Image: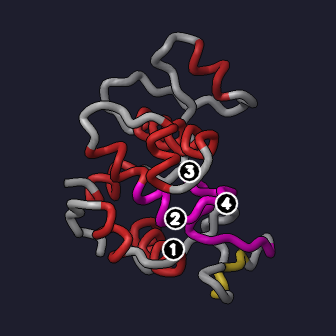
Amino acid sequence: MINADFKSISEIIYAFPNEKVCLNHLETLKWNGIVVSPFDENSKVYVCKKNRYRCRTTGKYFNAKNDTIFYNSKIELQKWFIAIWLISVKKKSISSIELGKTLAITQKSAWYMIKKIKESLELDRPNKKIKNVEQITKKEKLLKINAFEVVVEEKKLALTGWLQQLKK
């Protein structure tokens, strides 16, 4: 699944038919078999039901979506994967209206997805000047300062690696 070259949305749907398969794929890309707690890297991790894990040190539950653009999103991972693929293969940018119709979601949700995907791709561009800023509450304020400064979250999943694998 990881190295698949998709040519259409139906191929993505076939490869990722449900949320469990999508989460398994995300786990493989993020941890490659060695699950690490986002709360304490040295903590023992317990496997729980429904692709969830528990950090022994903090007692908090987590899954592969933590520290990614998918975290706290009610949109299914399959739709996220399709959106990432569409954004990466389109020569022109896709509108939120078009993405919303394609994924059968609201225009507002589609706009949110496009924003999150583009932000994560901006973080991975090598020609950008990137600064690590510790105490910023609003990312927008930082983006307005010097157009090239971006907040980097150390544990954020880099999308371009697996985006390139979904691409083509």
Q: Which of marks 3 and 2 is nearer the N terminus?
A: 3
Q: Do the numbered discs 1 and 2 sit on residues whose CB atoms are within 8 Å?
A: yes
Residue drawn at 60 percent across, 81 percent down: 51
Per the model, the C-alpha gap separating discs 3 and 4 is: 12 Å
Other residues around mark 4 within 10 Å, as few (<14) / some (14–19) / many (≥20): few
Q: Which of marks 1 and 4 is nearer the N terminus?
A: 1
Task: Tell me the kind of residue under disc 2.
Answer: Leu
Query: Which badge, 3 or 1, comes first in the chain's sequence?
Result: 1
Name the residue carrying label 4. Answer: 74
Disc number at residue 93? none
Q: Which quadrant would the N terminus be assigned to in this image?
A: bottom left
Magenta span: helix, strand or loop, mainly? loop
Mark drawn on residue 69: 3
Q: Do residues under tags 1 and 4 come within 8 Å of each other at their CB atoms?
A: no
Which residue is labeled 2 in the image?
A: 77
In the rendered structure, which amino acid carries the disc numbered 4? Answer: Lys
Residue type highlighted by circle 3: Ile
Q: Is residue 65 magenta?
A: yes
Q: Quadrant of residue 39?
A: bottom right
| Residue located 63% across and 69% down the image | 37
Q: Where is residue 106 in the image (x, y as percent from the top left)?
A: 62, 47
**Amino acid type of the residue that numbered disc 1 sits on in the rendered structure:** Leu
How much space separates mark 3 and mark 1, taking CA atoms? 13 Å
Q: Name the residue under label 1.
A: 23
Does residue 48 appear to the left or right of 78 in the view shown? Answer: right
Q: Is residue 93 magenta?
A: no
